[in-house]
Structure formats: C-alpha cells, structure tokens
Image: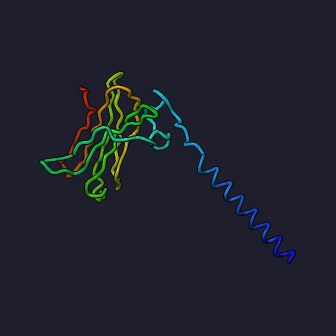
Amino acid sequence: MRHRLIRLGISVTVLLGSIATISTLAIAPASAATCSGYGCDSQDPVATGCSSGSYTVKSAPVAYNGVQYGTVELRWSPTCQTNWSRLTISAGGSNPQHYDRQVWVARQNPDAQMGFDWTSDGSPIYGDMLYAPGCAKAWATIQVGPNAIASGTAMQPGCWF
C-alpha cells in the first residue's frame, strides 16, 4: 500500500509540474525583434524576428515572353518597419541547371537597395531587409534559359521610383 501511495504522489507531482510548464509556455510572450531602424538593414527577417506578423504589401508575376515563372512579393514588417523581397517559383523550386535567381528590395529615402542571389533548389527565396517606413519596391529575376531572364516588380502602392 505504501508503494502505491508513493507512486501516486510521484504521478501527481509530475502531472502538476507538466501543467505548470504548459501554462508557462502558453502565456510566454512572443520574442522581440533583435534589430530596429537602420540597424535592420542587411539583416535576415526570420533570424531577427521581424518576419513575425509580416505580410505581403504587393505582389507581381515574374514572367518572360508571356509565361509566368514565379511571383515576387514586397514583404512588410510592422514590428520592425522593414521591407524585403520574396520570390516563389511556380515550378516548385527545382533548379537542376543551377540558373541564377535574384531578389531585390529598394527604399526611396535614403536611397538604398539590397539584393540576394540563389542558384540552388528551393522556393520561396527571400532576401535581407531594409528599414523603409516610406516607399519601397521589390523585384526579382529568374534565369529560365541560357540567354533568357524572367522578371517582375512589386511596388508599394502610391510610390514612384
């Protein structure tokens, strides 16, 4: 009988400890971004936490000769007030020829742009951020043949470059 009570006491203790741990995890705040302002320039939006709560401001097809090969998105982080570009490849990201894929983002003031090249498989592809509380645009290129480049530009509505 004494062994049963000890086992029951251990089980209750473990159960209560698990509930306390789960409760703590459930109310833990989201981690804060690790950069701010111009300090976010050239930083990875995922690694810094800026991608949390981000959304697409504008998207556009990446096309060549009327054929769409992907979609470029201008991404915005309200938390960090940054933009970056993201490219989704229509064919799922396979790249056996190791053709070049590029994503770019630019801000108007102060003038700056950031680019990222990728020649391996994978989709989506995203670049580093620029602090851009004003106007921004994203563009992307996909090499679709030895001498053929698909391109597209997604510009923030109301902005001109």
Residue closer to the observer: 78 or 12: 12
Q: How is the image coloured?
A: rainbow
The residue positioned 34% from the left and 37% from the top of the image is 115
> Where's residue 85, x and y in %?
34, 40
Describe residue 134's horizontal placement relative to residue 150 as left or right.
right
Depicted 70 relative to depicted 108: above or below: below
- Residue 106, position as x, y percentages in the image: 32, 31
Residue 159 is drawn in which quadrant?
A: top left
- The answer to whether 132 appears left or right of 72 in the picture is right
Q: How many marks?
A: 0
User: Which residue occupies 28% across, 32% down?
Assistant: 156
Viewer-proximal residue, 23 or 155? 23
Task: Establish if 110 lies above or below 47.
Answer: above
- Residue name at image x 33 percent, y 28 percent: 107
Which residue lies most toward the top here?
110
Question: Residue 157's x, y, as percent?
Answer: 26, 31
Q: Nearer the viewer, residue 66 or 17?
A: 17
Seen in the picture, residue 87 relative to 19 is either above or below; the reply is: above
Seen from this angle, which residue lies furthest right? 2
Q: Which quarter shows the C terminus?
A: top left
Q: Nearer the viewer, residue 160 or 121?
A: 160
At a point 64% along the width and 50% down the height, the residue shown is: 24
Which quadrant, please, contains the N terminus?
A: bottom right
Residue 41 coordinates in the image, percent (x, y): 43, 31
Toward the bottom, the furthest residue is 1
Residue 102 is left or right of residue 41, and the answer is left
